[in-house]
Structure formats: structure tokens, C-alpha cells
Amino acid sequence: MRVLRILGFNGNDDSGAALLEDGKIKYAVNEERLIRIKLYKGFPQKSINLILEENRIKPNDIDKVVVTGYPSKYPSIKDYLKKLAATSPLYYYYVAGRFKYMHHVIRVDFKETMSKARKLFPKSEIINVDHHLAHAASAHFTSGWEKNLIVTADGWGDRLSNGAYIGNNTQIERIHCSHEMDSLGYFYGRLTVALGFKFHRHEGKVTGLAAYAKPTKRLMKIMKRMVYFDRKSMSFKSKIGKYYIPSSDVKSGFIRLFSSFKKEEVAASAQAWLETVFKEYMEALIDEKGTSNVVLSGGVFGNVKLNQRVHEIKGVKNIFIHPHMGDGGLGIGGALYVHNQERPMNVSLKDVYLGPGYSNNGIKKELDKSRLKYAYYKDPTGAAADLLAKGQIVARFDGRMEYGPRALGNRTIMYQTTDKSVNDWLNKDLKRTEFMPFAPVVLSKYAKKCFNNIKGAEYAAKFMTITFDCTEWMRKNCPGVVHLDNTARPQLIDMKTNPGYFKILDEYRKLTGIPALINTSYNMHEEPIVCSPYDAIRAFKLGHLNNLLIGNYIVSQKG
């Protein structure tokens, strides 16, 4: 049987591309890492070129090209008029703007993207896969489980903001959905803007800030008027109001509405209401379909505290969140969906080191250009562990780059977890303004020593997509990675997943007795995670870091 090659890509928000060969995910990379613009929106030309070059294939070697992330049809005017009648006259102004925007997306963006795809791949079959179906496929077909309750949720995509599906082997059937205007993603995004942060970028800061206060009844009452769960229709509903319109526009009156409250209380109330509404939804789905494996994808599930609440729901047997839950994961999702229509496959991800890697020769050339002093080690893991045990920071650049928004060891900054003040001074050095503490990487066999109620979520925890309540031992011995609400977002690591990374942590454990290290992304604030040796050396200098483990070399400098 000939090799079946499928290339999937998303040319919209957080664009990127992925290559499947006979069902195996061979390569996946997002344009932001190559072009160095965070969450880059546009055709992923560099990503596609890199995939072809690295895999030594030509465009004609690609059998199918899957385009995702764009609506291909206009929404129903009848559908919008129904929403208009059911909500508020103010909705009319939104509808007019929405149709204008959709016209541009379909007639300009989508048309241009499909044209470029046909020119690049003239002999390939070009297929368009629905946005939320691609999200659903990304979670179901990488879960490793045959039957799943699949839930997607984001701002909007192809006229929906949410979908519930049953995944059964190669089949994915949608059972419920929510209109694009009834969006949990827009709800949380609007409040992100009201708090002075950037929509579609800083929602994680709201999640972190939420731990600094308690929700208030007054704020919860306001938020209840914005979005809620309707059990009868099994969907979310938004209420259009004087200031609240679930879109990318935020009215000044909406910002003023929350300006009289403490930011921490607004964040805490937003998080609490999101958890409340989504829990109601999930419990209704479980009541309807019974105990189930639950798999999640879509930008809303970048909210790791929400994922913990789903895991805690009675009737959820196992939980998995696709490692690239946002739109940057659509390329893999679309490709997996198309592949399963021809050749069945469902994989459990060993790892997501799917991006570019660099040789020691290439690394040495960049080090020589930088004029930094460095030392070569046949096996640098012991030296790195020793530096960490002495209280030094070690940035690690090695192997293939991670797929998704989380640093998982190959483009990572490491430090000891025992320093409670680390969140203040290290964020300052990296020019970050985060409220969340740093996340830990933990040896898998010590997971229960560090976290409560982890059973059924071990797979998700390999990819840093869920929080857990910390044990008393963890709170006492690793305060640098425990949040104010006593939770942490771990990456569980074992020898098979990443031998070099594992050996550093295991050697550190032997020296200190602590099976955990801080793992934070290797980047400067508002920049993508580093991709190349040049990026790593630049960030090393700008971040005032002590040590850089890059390939088989260690570079040291005074902080």
C-alpha cells in the first residue's frame, strides 16, 4: 500500500501546518515561531515550506491538502432574524457588522487561501473541513480512546461557538451546538479586555488573577445576564444588552461597567461564572449520554482551571485536552479527520516534539557568532542538574520544538521550585507581567506524592493542560509552583517521553530529594517561544539568565 500523505493547515488565527504520513503525525509547526510574530494570522507559507524541506518531499508528493479555520458559506439570514427576535433590537447592529465581516472572510480571505493552496499543490485534492469538526477531530483522534464525548468551545468558528459530539472509532457525530453569538469564548474575552488585557492573548492572565480574590454576588449577577446555559436547547445563550455584544468589539460603556470593581474580583467572578455555566452543561451531557471519556478542544480549554473542574465532574471517567487546543491545532485536526475517512487510525500521543530540530554543528556556528563562552559535554544532563541544585537558572534548547502553546522541555527555562519569591524576580528579568506562578515539571512516578485526584487525567497532564490541587507535601516543599488557591499545572515526564529532560530532573531529585522543577516557556514577554539557536541565544542574553544548555553545549554568564 502506497504512503498516504495529508497536509493540513489553518491560515487564520495562529496559522500553521501539519503533515500526516499513513496516520502518523510527522511534523507540526505554527507560523508564529518562524516569523516571530505571536499568534500570527495569515497564510502559513513558512510552515508549509519547512514541512516540505524537512521531510524531503515535493508538493506533488502530497495526496490531500486540508484547509481549516475558514467559513466557506454565508450564514442563514433566517437564522440571524430568529436570534434578533429572541434577544434584543440591539442585535440588529451586530448582525449588520457581522455580515460585512463574513463577506470579507468568505469572498476575500477564504477565496485567496484556497487559490494559494491550489497553486502550491496543483495535483493534490484540496478539501475544506469545518472549524469545530477539526477541533473535535484533533481531540478524538489523538485521545487513544475509541469512544469519547467530545466538546469544543471557543470564540466562534464556522457560525458556531461550541459543539458536543460523540466520537466512535472513525465516526464523529454532532449532537448539540451553540450559535456563534452564544459564546463562552467571547464572554471571557470581553472581560479580558475590560480588565485592560488583550483579547485572544491574555485570557490566561485573567485566570491567574482570579486566585487573588473571591467572586462577588453583584458581579456574578451581572455576568449571569451575559451568558448562561439553557438546558432545554442544550446550548449556551447570550443576552445582548446596552453594552454587551458578544463580538470582537468592546464598548466603552462595558469597560466602565466594571471599572468600579477591583480587578481581582472581576477576574474571580468571570472564572467562577465560566466554571459554573460549563459545569451545568457537562453535567447535562453526562446525564444524557452516561459516564464517559471526555475530550476537549478549542480556545476556551486553554483555561486549565476549567479543565480541572470538568475532570472533577461525577461521570467523567478520563479526560484529555488536545495539546494545541486553540486554532493553531486546526491543521492537525482537519488532516486527522480526512485521514480517518480513508484509513482508520486513533493514536495516543507519545509526545508532541513535532517541530524543527537543530544539529550540534548548526548550534556551534551560532554560538561562535555570538562570541559567548561555552563548553562541550558528551552528556550535559548531570552538569545541568548540578547547576540547578546550586540555585542556578538553566534554559534548555534541545531536540525538536514542541507543538502547541506550552513549553514541554525542549524550549524551556528551568529553576528550583523551593524559592517562593521566584514569580516576582524571574518574571521581571524576562519582562513578563504574569499573575500565575510558574508551572512544574514532575517525574511521573511521583505524581501522587505531589497532586490530589490525578487519576484519569494523567494523559492530559503530560501536556500541561490541566491543574490539580496540591498535596500538603507539595505545598510545603515546592512553594514556587503552587498558586494561591493551592493548585498547580504540571507536566508529567518519564524516560520514554524525553530522555534528556527526564535525566536532568531525575539527577536533580537525587541531589535534592525534590522530584520537581520549574518549567516556564523559553521566550521574552509577548514573543513566541524560541525556535532556532539564534532565538535561544538572543533570549538568553536579554533575559539575564545564568546558564544555557543548548544541544551538547553549556553557556554560562553572570546574572
Image (spheres, grey):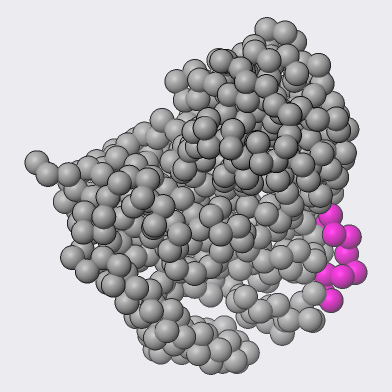
Q: Residue at x 34, y 42 (%)?
A: 26
In this rendering, position of residue 11 left or right of residue 129: right
**Residue located farthest toward the top when viewing the structure as drawn:** 510
Which quadrant holds residue 551?
top right
Confirm whether the magenta stretch covers residue 347.
no
Q: Residue at x 39, y 58 (%)?
A: 48
Give the vertical position of 519 relative to 507 (above or below). Answer: below
Visible residue check, residue 356: yes
**Region of the chain picked out in magenta, as a range:** 256-265
Visible residue check, residue 327: no
Which quadrant holds residue 94?
bottom right
Residues 331 and 275: in front is 331
Confirm whether the magenta stretch covers residue 258.
yes
Q: Residue at x 21, y 54 (%)?
A: 61
Residue 175 image offset from top left, x and y in percent: 34, 59
Work out which quarter of the rendered image holds the C terminus and state it: top right
Residue 534 image offset from top left, x and y in percent: 62, 45
Residue 460 image offset from top left, x and y in percent: 50, 35
Residues 482 and 18: in front is 18
Give the vertical position of 1 relative to 516 (above or below). Answer: below
Residues 50 and 455: in front is 50
The number of numbered discs placed on residues in the rendered structure image is 0
Magenta segment's dominant SS is helix
Give the vertical position of 358 relative to 213 (above or below). Answer: above
Work out which quarter of the rendered image holds the N terminus and state it: top left
In this rendering, position of residue 52 left or right of residue 378: left
In this rendering, position of residue 555 left or right of residue 506: right
Residue 526 image offset from top left, x and y in percent: 71, 56
